[in-house]
Image (cartoon, rainbow, N blue to C red):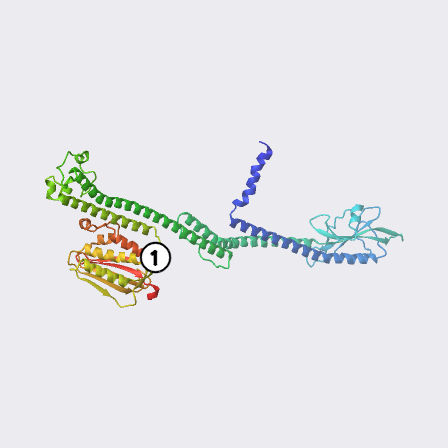
Amino acid sequence: MSPVSAFTPRWQRLRSLPGRIPLRIKLITAVLALVAIALTAISIAGISVLRGYLLAGYDGQLQLVQGQAEHTVAIYVISPGPNPGPLQFEGGAIIWIPDGTHRPVQIAEPVRPRFPDSRTAVVLPGPKVPSSASWLAAHQGTPVTVPAQSGGDRWRVLLFRQSFQNLTGGLTSGTVIVGVNVTSVYNTIGELARIDLIVSGIVVIALAVVGVAIVRSSLRPLTDIELTAEAIAAGDLSRRVPDRDPRTEVGRLGRSLNTMLAQIESAFHARADSEAAARRSEERMRQFVADASHELRTPLTAIRGYAEYYRQLGGMRNGTAPGPGPATTASRAGSTAPGPDAGTTAQEREAGPLAASGQLTRPDLDRIMQRVEQESARMGLLVEDMLLLARLDQQRPIERRPVDLLTLTTDAVQDARMIAPRRKIELTVGAGTAFLVLGDEARLRQVISNLMTNALTHTPDGTGIDVRILAGGPDSTLPVPSVILEVADTGPGLSTEQAERVFERFYRADQARGRRTGGTGLGLAIVAALVAAHGGTVGVDTTPGGGATFRITLPLAAEAA
């Protein structure tokens, strides 16, 4: 493997490193780095300014000595030892380097008291000045700091050219170096740097502690958002980000996220409701097909049974029928379809005593054809009811125009009185405005007719029926002004289980009575579907042995309000 290929993954890991560092660490590190840089810059600037200020005072002293030297005519050069000549610098050092010799001569030695308030002095080590001509030429006229000849002291020196009268009366040229001890300056600067370092460290540590708390508090909303996202991913769609001040960036972000989450939850629930509705619709359709097949099989079995019975007797020949011929394969095998009405025995009961003698007369044939016609009509009615329910399931729009429900109710009561003249059928009209509703008049007539037919069919003869039409106000069932229509009877009533299922399709509280009266089990289901299509509700109140009250509630039309 080449060095370049080995270096590439390492470089890629280094490049991806910032992306793997948590945001709070990045923020704290960046803040601390900026603060450290700022404190360092401030310390360096402060120390530099202080150093320049303190050294400027000593540079002024050196320039004063330089001016004094320029006005000195003679200098007594005595080597070695202190020079008692006229050029003096108390507390400082003066060095004379004659031209051509490069041998420094100490003119004034620095001294300091041996002890505080002591009259005896100690000679200090003077400045260590290079005697090379190049160094002397490079630093002419500019104060410069040099170390002491021994120890750790520092000196500030100033070099300048000067000519003096020597002992022979001639002039001697050379370089004069005047210096002052500035060790105290650098000690002060060092102490200041140490204090700055300690203070800066304390500031950085304190800022780190405070910064961690501030960053953690500032990032808490992001942590809440993260926890909310995890909860939603786990399936809790009702979870929301806590509300924050909308004037902040995090507050605006949280508000936007909550809006988005509300829309997602709404869309998810809508989808779930749609899927549930589709499953319920599919289940209802399967049940509907099964029930319809069962209900259609009964009249078809009866029709087929009568046809086979007619064929087995040989049919009509000149108004009479011969005796039964050889049994067919179907007759030997039994009834071709199951059902209570199928089979020869049932048909013989319907045909009467002549069938037992093996003779089929025209009246017998008329009765058979009448039964075939009745079962065909029943099957046609069943198909019409199923088609109506199918159209209602498709939620096709119905005609909507103002309809006087009182007029329809009055007509239905009159029809019922004609059908059952010995029954006591009362109509009670409540106080209120016109009972106008928006809907399809033909369908509303069918609703009332089905309710009346149900009361007449499923109650004993002589049972009274009370029809009431009332004005209703907004309530829990319908939050708008409404019209209430009730059909009450004093019959046997319904059990709790029957009342819960009475509006189901193909449900019969009394199976035997329903089939005997030709009912399809769809009347009340059609009532519920039509009322729902008109925006109303249906219900039933019943007491076993105390009768039943069927109630429909429809919204009142705006014209009647």
Left or right placement of residue 144 versus residue 202 in this view: right
Please state which of residues 534 and 15 is positioned toward the viewer in this rendering. 534
Q: Quadrant of residue 433?
A: bottom left
- Camera sees residue 435: yes
Q: Which residue type does callout 1 highlight? A: Glu
Where's the C terminus, which quadrant?
A: bottom left
- In the picture as drawn, the residue positioned furthest to the front comes out as 318
Left or right placement of residue 169 versus residue 87 in this view: right
Please state which of residues 47 and 361 is positioned toward the viewer in this rendering. 361
Number of numbered discs: 1
Q: Residue at x 28, y 55 (%)?
A: 528
- Camera sees residue 108: no
Q: Quadrant of residue 297?
A: top left
- In the picture as drawn, the residue positioned furthest to the right comes out as 169
Above/below status of 478 relative to 144: below
The x, y position of residue 195, in whole percent, is: 61, 54
Above/below status of 330 relative to 515: above
Q: Residue under circle 1?
A: 399
Left or right placement of residue 372 versus residue 32 in this view: left
Q: Quadrant of residue 307?
A: top left
**Secondary structure state at the residue bearing disc 1:** loop
Above/below status of 427 relative to 355: below
Please state which of residues 414 and 82 is positioned toward the viewer in this rendering. 414
Please state which of residues 318 and 286 is positioned toward the viewer in this rendering. 318
The x, y position of residue 477, in whole percent, is: 30, 60
Q: Dot 1: within a 10 Å radius of its alpha carbon, few (fewer than 14), some, or many (20 or more) residues?
A: few
The x, y position of residue 495, in whole percent, is: 20, 54
The x, y position of residue 56, in whole percent, is: 72, 57
Left or right placement of residue 171 versus residue 116 in this view: right
Where's the N terminus, which quadrant?
A: top right
